[in-house]
């Protein structure tokens, strides 16, 4: 069942790499420009309609945005985001619930969702210094929470 | 010695005053000193700063209902104390005229 | 004699305010379990109140996140004297699982003065009862 769904996914996304994870999830690797067309395809043609969560990751040479979609199957759209220019198109017009997750990505990684109508602080306190993104791998904090090294900005 | 002097207003008042002073005085006896921190005297708002401006509401609608109530009740009291012999129907006319005039408050002249 | 009366009143009916300063909620669940009939903290006269103005003891869980530190201090200030603080769990005592993280002050004693620390992750309700009984015993002894 998952195998024929994998085949359907491969034919829906011919330019992207589709892999089957060990827990039955299907991973599709995308670039930021392909994100919104991919989400539309998933929702309309393959009936995977619900966005469960957006998880950010910092692998050293890029950021990864994992958009977990559920329906009859779980499909994760993994968007590879450039570290120097971390802009991604926002899903806010398609899925309003994504606004909160994108705010969290912005606070913790500095990934900028272009088109998000609400960019208040979500995951860090109000008096957190601007420009310090805690979950990046090149930011180190000392015991008091002061930043001691921070390479890329 | 006539004990009904104790029911006389001045004596009863002073007795009540003394009683409440005794209760508060006992409270002061058993209290501990309060540390004079500014946050202690702020209204409790789950730890946040309380902004009084945000919780105010406009009194206009309440005022209109309350003044209508007051005027109509005074009018009814006037009617109830009318001397006997006067027809009650004229009193009804009086009340209707008053009600109509107060209802002008609900008209919004924009 | 008045001192004995005051001590008796304070030891026999400590009203608590429960506060979560950024915890994972496990210690909060255990605190509530301790108040329920099976472990029954209420037999000590303890009542769970909703406002710091009514409380004698602040029962606090969680490593204090930076966002909560100001609020915790404000709530502690709003309690009337005499007041005591009980730190429930490893996180409230020293940061626990979150020690060294970017967003926590490690332990509530960076913000408020603590009278009793109850270790555990999460705390066993028996440990909460033990800690509360020890706190009340120390109040009894301090005045005697």
Image (spheres, helix red, strand yellow):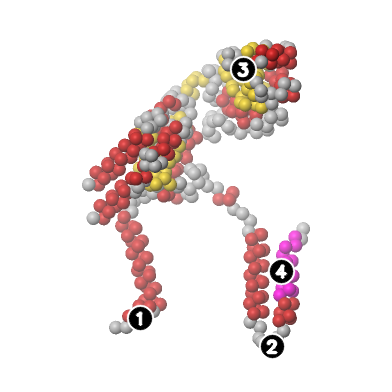
Of tags 3 and 4, the one toward the viewer is: 3
Q: CA distance from mark 2 to mark 3?
A: 94 Å
Q: Which residue is mark 4?
A: B102
Q: Which quadrant would the N terminus of chain B be assigned to in this image?
A: bottom left
Relative to C24, A68 lies left or right: right
Residue B2's place in the image compared with C83, above or below, is below
Residue at the extreme bottom of the image, as rendered: B85
Q: Which residue is mark 2?
A: B85
* x 47%, y 31%: residue: C24
| Image coords of residue B40 (percent x, y) | 43, 48
Q: CA distance from mark 1 to mark 3?
A: 92 Å
Relative to C3, A119 lies left or right: right
Q: Quadrant of residue C95?
A: top left
Mark 2 or 4, nearer chain start: 2
Relative to A104, A141 lies left or right: left
Q: Which residue is mark 1?
A: B4
Are labels 2 and 3 assigned to the same chain? no
Q: Chain of mark 1?
A: B
Q: Which residues are magenta?
A: B94-108
> Alpha-carbon neighbours of circle 4 within 10 Å: few (<14), some, or many (≥20)?
some
Mark 3: secondary structure:
loop
């Amino acid at each position: 069942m998952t195998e024929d769904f994998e085949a359907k996914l491969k034919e829906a996304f011919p330019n992207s790499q589709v892999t089957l994870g060990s827990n039955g999830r299907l991973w599709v690797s995308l670039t930021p420009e392909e994100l919104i067309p991919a989400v539309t395809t998933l929702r309309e043609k393959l009936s995977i309609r619900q966005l469960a969560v957006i998880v950010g990751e910092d692998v050293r040479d890029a950021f990864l945005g994992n958009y977990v979609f559920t329906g009859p199957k779980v499909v994760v759209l993994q968007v590879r985001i450039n570290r120097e220019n971390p802009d991604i198109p926002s899903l806010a017009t398609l899925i309003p619930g994504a606004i909160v997750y994108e705010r969290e990505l912005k606070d913790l990684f500095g990934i900028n969702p272009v088109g998000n109508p609400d960019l208040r602080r979500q995951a860090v306190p109000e008096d957190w210094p601007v420009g310090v993104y805690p979950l990046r791998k090149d930011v180190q904090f000392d015991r008091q929470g002061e930043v001691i090294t921070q390479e890329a900005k | 010695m006539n004990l009904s002097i104790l029911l006389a207003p001045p004596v009863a008042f002073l007795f009540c005053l003394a009683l409440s002073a005794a209760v508060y005085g006992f409270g002061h006896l058993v209290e501990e000193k309060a540390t004079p921190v500014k946050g202690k005297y702020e209204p409790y708002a789950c730890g946040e700063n309380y902004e009084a401006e945000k919780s105010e509401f406009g009194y206009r609608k309440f005022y209109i209902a309350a003044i209508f109530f007051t005027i109509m009740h005074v009018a009814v009291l006037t009617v109830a104390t009318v001397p006997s012999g006067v027809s009650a129907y004229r009193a009804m006319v009086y009340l209707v005229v008053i009600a109509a005039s107060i209802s002008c408050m609900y008209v919004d002249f924009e | 004699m008045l001192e004995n009366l005051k001590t008796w009143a304070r030891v026999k009916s400590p009203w608590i305010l429960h506060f979560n300063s950024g915890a994972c909620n496990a210690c909060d669940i255990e605190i509530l379990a301790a108040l329920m009939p099976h472990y029954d903290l209420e037999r000590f006269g303890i009542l769970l109140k909703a406002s710091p103005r009514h409380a004698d003891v602040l029962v606090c869980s969680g490593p204090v996140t930076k966002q909560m530190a100001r609020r915790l201090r404000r709530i502690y200030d709003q309690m009337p004297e005499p007041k005591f603080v009980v730190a429930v769990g490893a996180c409230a005592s020293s940061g626990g699982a979150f020690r060294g993280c970017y967003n926590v002050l490690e332990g509530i004693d960076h913000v408020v003065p603590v009278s009793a620390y109850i270790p555990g992750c999460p705390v066993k309700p028996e440990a909460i009862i033990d800690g509360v009984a020890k706190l009340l015993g120390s109040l009894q002894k301090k005045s005697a």
